[in-house]
Image (cartoon, helix red, strand yellow):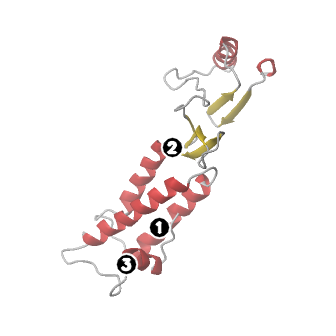
Amino acid sequence: MVFANARLIRYADDFVVMARYISPRIISWLEAKLEDQLKLSINRDKTKVVNVKQPGATLDFLGFSMRYDRDIHGRSWTYLNTFPSRKTELAYRDRLRLLTSSGYKQSLRQIIQEINEKHRGWKNYFSIGYPRQCFRHMNWFTLNRIKVLLNHRSQRKCRPLQDGESLYSGIRRMGYVPL
């Protein structure tokens, strides 16, 4: 798409076309190329044109959300903020719920080890951009899920913590690594 100075970014069957202005000419060229020449069908429900420079406009691609935000230090410029999308966060929380449900019969150390494996993969994938706030929310969610797990472990309270030890320091002692 040299005529439009546009860039096509693709991954498997997903792609994004980046240009300063998406004209009807670009749209018709893409539709002709995909449907006529490549014999692919375009999902019209998912296809949309997003101007990320507009306030509140967000582009979701490959589990990331991208939008322009104001500078956090109060300066007059904006920056492209990249962070895990809401849909991805909810899916990850569901996976953590499965690991920390009362029906999951594993030892606490093994559960913490599995959580660490999930955390490591998620952190490696989403470390691009500015995911700090999302990571804090996930750490808080994980801590609360472990708390619920320990409270519902059996008819008697499960007490893996030492006297006077907080839940956070206790699970850190057992090997928990936060995001």
Circle 3 Cα neighbour tier, 10 Å, few/some/many (<14 / 14–19 / ≥20): few
Q: Position of residue 168 (x, y in %)?
A: 41, 74
Count of picture labels: 3
What amino acid type is highlighted by mark number 1? Glu
Residue found farthest to the bottom: 163
Residue sitting farthest toward the right: 2
Seen in the picture, residue 60 relative to 158 is either above or below; the reply is above
Query: Mark 2 vs mark 1: which is more N-terminal?
Result: 2
Question: 81 left or right of 21?
Answer: left
Q: Residues within 10 Å of mark 2 (few under 14, many from 20)?
A: some
- Does 81 appear above or below 6? below
Residue 139, position in %: x, y?
Answer: 45, 62
Q: Which residue is mark 2?
A: 85
Where is mark 3, residue-wise?
A: 166
What whole-number distance in Å separates the C-alpha atoms at marks 1 and 3?
21 Å
Q: Nearer the viewer, residue 48 or 37?
A: 48
Dot 1 or dot 3: first in sequence order is: 1
How far apart are labels 2 and 1 at the CA level?
Answer: 23 Å
The numbered disc on residue 114 is 1
Instruction: Answer few, some or many: residues within 10 Å of disc 1's Cα (few below 14, many 20 plus, some between 14 and 19).
Output: some
Q: Nearer the viewer, mark 2 or mark 1?
A: 2
Give the mark toward the camera: 3 or 2: 3
Residue 8 place in picture, x, y as percent: 71, 30
Question: Residue sitting at 59 percent across and 41 percent down?
Answer: 70
The span from disc 3 to disc 2 (Cα, nearest Å) is 31 Å
Q: Residue at x 58, y 28 (%)?
A: 54
> Mark 2 and mark 3 in contact (Cβ < 8 Å)?
no
Above or below, 71 relative to 55: below
- Residue plotted at (52% across, 32% down): 56
Dot 3: what SS?
loop
Q: Nearer the viewer, residue 23 or 32?
A: 23
Q: Position of residue 12 (x, y in %)?
A: 64, 37
